[in-house]
Image (cartoon, rainbow, N blue to C red):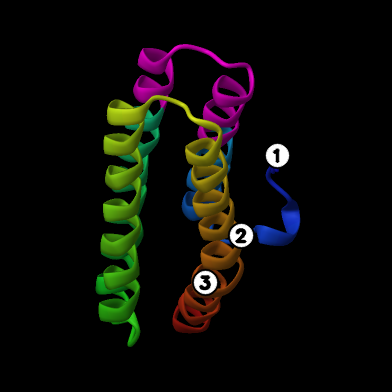
Amino acid sequence: MRISWDESLATGVEEIDNQHKELFARFDRLFTACSDGRGKEEVLQLLGFLREYVVEHFTAEEKLQFRSHYPLYPEHKQLHVAFIKDVEKLERSFRDEGATLSLVIMTNKTLTTWLLQHIGKMDMEFAAYLKQQQG
């Protein structure tokens, strides 16, 4: 399932929204590479590129949460840690198995679910808290 950025996912926090848009763009490049049957090395490179950006984004988001004394910061951070582990597991599977159909489907499902559910719920809750704190 191909997904793209939708303004309904905008948090209203420019830094976070810009990073989310970049996550969607990187996911789209990965999805396209898998769908087009590109080589294992290219898919692995794109998956690594996505993972690195996820870590960068989570670090920035967690700093905002920590500085604003967000009460759900520990839980949010745990979700980030779990997602990074999921992406690392996908990388290992691609490295070991290549882009099998079942692995491509699992990757698509994992990333799509995360992007839509985490941003649509957790990040929206944080953005509302942040806006309230900033008055």
Whether the magenta-drawn stretch holds residue 43 is answered as yes
Q: Amino acid at mark 2?
A: Leu
The circle drawn on residue 2 is 1
Q: Amino acid at mark 3?
A: Ala
Circles 3, 1 touching at the beta carbon (< 8 Å): no
Residue 123 position in % (x across, y down): 50, 68
Q: CA distance from mark 1 to mark 2?
A: 12 Å
Q: Residue at x 27, y 71 (%)?
A: 78
Residue in front for this viewpoint, 104 or 77 = 104
Tell me the SS state at disc 3: helix
Residue 42 position in % (x across, y down): 41, 15
Q: Which residue has dot 3 on it?
A: 127
The circle drawn on residue 116 is 2
Q: Give the mark toward the camera: 3 or 2.
A: 2
- The mark nearer the N terminus, 1 or 2, is 1
Q: Amino acid at mark 1?
A: Arg
SS majority, magenta: helix
Residue in front for this viewpoint, 55 or 106 = 106
Q: Residue at x 30, y 78 (%)?
A: 73
Residue range in magenta is 26-46
Residue 41 position in % (x across, y down): 35, 14
Q: Is 107 placed above or below 49 here?
A: below
- The mark nearer the N terminus, 3 or 1, is 1
Q: CA distance from mark 3 to mark 1?
A: 26 Å
